[in-house]
Amino acid sequence: MNFPPRDFEQLRHIIILIQQGELDLPMGRKIFRGLEAMINEPELVASSNIVELSRWVCLSPASITRLSKILGFQGFNQFKNIFKQKSKLRTKFYSSGVEELIEQRFQCAKDLLTQQFQMVKDNITHSINNVNEADLLLASTLLAKKRRIFIFGYRQSSTVANILKYGLTLIRHNVQLLVQADHGLALALSQLQKEDLLVVIGSAPYSDRTLKVTALVQKQGCQILVITDSELSPLRAFSAVSLQIPTGGQFYANSAVASAFMIESLLCLTATQLGQVAVSNLQKHEILLSNLDVST
C-alpha cells in the first residue's frame, strides 16, 4: 500500500483495509468516520476549503491536517488534490484503454484475439479458484428463496444485470431491474423491503450512484448480494454476500465475459435449489412460446 496514495481508488482501498482490520493507522474513530464521509462525497471535498470541510465532517481544521499527514500527504492541499483528480481519472478510463491497444501494435488481428482469450481465461480461472463454496451456496439460496429480487447495474454493468434478470425470470417470479425511468430511482428504492434481495453489480471505476444506491438499501434493512471485481471493492462493505469476478482484458471497458460465465453458473445452481418450481416455470414459458408460434 502506497503512502501517500497515488489516486482516489488507492485512498478508498486504505479505508477498506482499515474497516477489515488489515491496516492500523494512528487515527481515532471520529477522524476515521470523517474520512469515510469524505470518501462518500468526493465532489464536496474537492470544492471545499479546509474550514468549510471541517464544518461538514465535524472535525477541526487541525484534525483534518493531521489526517492528511497520517495518510502520508504533506498537508491538506495535497490531500485535496486526490479528490480533484478523481473526476479527471474517471473520464480517461475508456480512452486510455484504446491508447494502450494502439501502443501494442498487434502484427495481425488474431494476435489480439489470442491475448484477449488468454486474459478472459485467466479471469474465469481466478473466479473459480478464489470463490468460496459457502458464498456460492448462500448467493444461490438468496436468489431462490427471497420473496422479491431487484437487480441494479449502472452504465456498462446494466448489460450483466440484464443477463441475470432474464435467466432468473425464466425460473422464478418477482424479479425486476431496479429502474423506473418514468418515476425515478428514489421511488424504485422505496419499494424494497426487508424480505427482498437487491443484487448490485459494479466494477472499477465504481460509480457514485451505485455506491449511494447500495448504502441506502442497506439502511432500509434489505439484504444485498454484490457481484464485483475485487476483494477491495467498496461495494463489499454493504453486502450479505459477494462474488468477486475480475474484469481485466484488452477491451477498453470492463470485460463482461467472466461475469457472464459466473452468472450463468450461479443461475444453474439457483435452478437446482428451486427444483421442480424451476421446471414448472420453464414449462409454462415453453407453452406460452408455443402459443405465440415462437420457436423454443
Image (cartoon, rainbow, N blue to C red):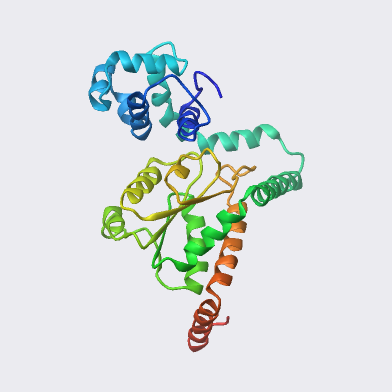
56 to the left or right of 12 = left
230 to the left or right of 217 = right
Residue 103 percent across, percent down from the top left: 66, 31
**Front position in the image: 40 or 140:** 140
Instruction: Indicate whether 13 appears above or below 76.
Output: below
**Viewport quadrant of the C terminus:** bottom right
Count of marks placed on residues = 0
Instruction: Indicate whether 31 appears above or below 291.
Output: above
Residue 97 percent across, percent down from the top left: 58, 37
- Give the farthest residue toward the bottom: 291
**Viewport quadrant of the N terminus:** top right
**Front position in the image: 105 or 268:** 268
Residue drawn at (43%, 73%), measured in percent from left and top? 173
Residue 69 percent across, percent down from the top left: 42, 14
Residue drawn at (36%, 45%), measured in percent from left and top? 215
Residue drawn at (27%, 17%), measured in percent from left and top? 60
